[in-house]
Structures are given as structure tokens and as C-alpha cells.
Amino acid sequence: MECNLTGPSFFTAAGDGTASRRAAAATPALARQGSPEEPNIMGQVIRKDASADDIIHDTRTAHENARARGGLWQSLADQALASVLTLHETATAEATAASAAAAPLIAARNEARRNANDLVGRVADHIWNAVGRPRNDANLALLFPNGIAYYVEGDLDTQPKRMLLLAKLLTSNLHPRLPSLQSTAAASEVTAAAEALAQAIEAATGAALHDELCSQVRVAVSRSASMELANLKRLYKAHGFLEADIHAVIPSRVVRRRTPKPPSVPKPTAGSQISAPPAPAVTAPTVATPTVVSSAVTAPTVAAPAVTAPTVTAATGAAG
């Protein structure tokens, strides 16, 4: 019995088997890549410049999801995220305590400034009344060159020193109509208010700086947490986990591209006229007119023959 190696049935069978094996081998790759109708969109870890609260939320969620799966998922997540989450809890507690400690000191500083401003204004009114309520007084301008604005406005840290300068001017007896006892008493009140304000500023400044530092540390820890999330994703991929499974544990943040807005057209207002852009000038093509040279036809000159009339001589007859 001969084996037909050249018949169509052999090539058909071999061809079908090869195609089937190739299709079977290519099916998983095509499934992983996704069809053109359903493209495979890679998940993204939250950016490090996102909100600190959002970063910590994603980090804590990823750690909880990994612990729920257990096994290698949990061990890798504990390795990458446990320490940074503990550090963030410590920084948050410290920031909360610092903010709570700074709040009453800042409130006391603000109250001391309001009291100091009211005192300076009251002293200025009493002095103006004592010197006769002048509309214009050069000596009074030496004490208050621009009203009370110089002493109560501007930088808070330097306000106590400016108030001490006012107290020094009050004790110098610059105004001849201002009683010495009144100016001395006013200087004592201004000095006491300036010292109280300086103490309140010093106490609040240290607490406010501590609160600011704790807030900055908390933000820095959240930035580290975002980088640890990206590192955890790389660890999962290195151990062969699929992208979809990884982002079932780590929240995915899809970055949406913003569509550029069309240029805005100004809306006409009442009584306004929007002139249309001038139409482009269309120049008609110049057609050269052919020059026709007329040939002058000169008629021939015909000289008329000169006709001489004959001379008739009358015959004279002799009458007989």
C-alpha cells in the first residue's frame, strides 16, 4: 500500500493542524493585548504631587486589600507600606497635637494686638482733646506723623518696638499744651501694652512654627508613600502578577487628558457693534489693449488741365 505524500489530502490535513496550533498559541497573547475595540489601558499609581490625604487613602486601601488576599500579596505589601503608614500615623498625631497647642496661643496674640491697637487710638484721642482739638498742629504731627497707622499697621513682629518709640516720644514733652502728667501716664500704658504684645507674639510664634513643621513632615511622608506604592507595583510585576490583579489591590488613577477649549468668541454687548473683518481687496487683471495703427491712405492728386478761353475779335463793318 502506497502512502500518497503528494495528494491534496496530506497538505490539507497538515495545513489545518499547523494553523490550529498557531491559533492556539496566539490566542493568549491576543487576549492579553486586547482587541482594537477594547484597548488595554494600563493602570497608574497616584502621583506624588497629588493631595496628601488622597495619597494616604490609596496607600491604606492597597495595604488592606493585600492583607485580605494574604500570601505573597500581603508579605510584599507589608514590606513596602507598613513602615510608611506607621510613620504617617506618628506624623499626623504630632501635627494634630501641635495645632491644638498653637491655636490658643495664636488667639491670645491676636487679642493682644487688638488691645494694643485700641489703646493707641484711645491715647491719640485723649491727647488731641487735651491740646484743643486742632485741625492742623505741627507739634501733634511729631507724635502721630500719619495718625496712628504707623503704630498699629504693618508687620506684627515689629509692632511692639514701634509702640515703644511712641512711649519715648510721649515722655519727651514735644507738645507745649500737653500736660506732663497726662503724657507720662499715656507713655506707661503704651509701654505695658507693647510688652504684653511682645510676649504674646513670642509664645505664638514658636507654637506656629512647630505646627507648620509638623504639617510639612506629614506632607513629606505622604510623598514617600506614593513612591512606595509605585515600588510595590514593580514588586508585584516582578513576581509575575497580572496588571488587572495588581490594580485590584492598588487603586488605579487614570489620568484624563483635557480637551482644549475652542477659542472664545466675544459676545456683543448692548449698543456695541462688532464690525466684520474687511473683505480682501480683489484687483481685476489688467488686459493690455492692442494698439491698432491706422494706415493713412492719401488720394492721388489729379491736376485739372488749364482751359484757356478763345479770344473772339469783333469784326468792324464799314457802314456805307
Image: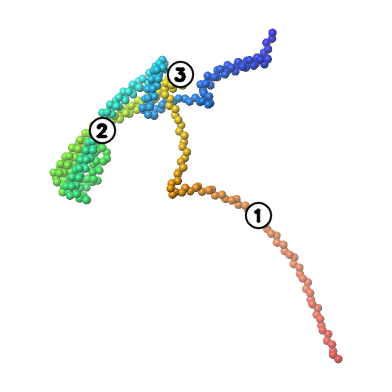
**Residue at the spot 46% in from the left edge and 37% down from the top edge:** 261
Characterize the local packing of mark 1: few (<14), some (14-19) or many (20 or more) Cα atoms within 10 angstroms.
Answer: few
Give 13 or 297, whichever is nearer the viewer.
13
| Residue placed under numbered mark 2 in the picture | 106
Left or right side of 126 for 40: right
Residue 161 appears in view = no
Characterize the local packing of mark 2: few (<14), some (14-19) or many (20 or more) Cα atoms within 10 angstroms.
Answer: some
**Disc 2 to disc 3, how far (Cα)?**
52 Å
**Residue at the spot 46% in from the left edge and 21% down from the top edge:** 244
Q: Residue 58, located in which quarter of the rendered image? A: top left
Instruction: Provide residue 170's location: percent of width, then percent of height.
Output: 18, 43
Mark earlier in primary sequence (1, 2): 2
Q: Residue 236, located in which quarter of the rendered image? A: top left
| Residue placed under numbered mark 3 in the picture | 241
Residue 285 appears in view = yes
- Residue at the farthest top position: 1
| Residue placed under numbered mark 1 in the picture | 290
Disc 1 is placed on an element classified as loop
Disc 3 is placed on an element classified as loop
Dot 1 amino acid type:
Pro
- Residue at the farthest right position: 320
Q: Residue 14, located in which quarter of the rendered image? A: top right
Give 29 or 292, whichever is nearer the viewer.
29
Mark earlier in primary sequence (3, 1): 3
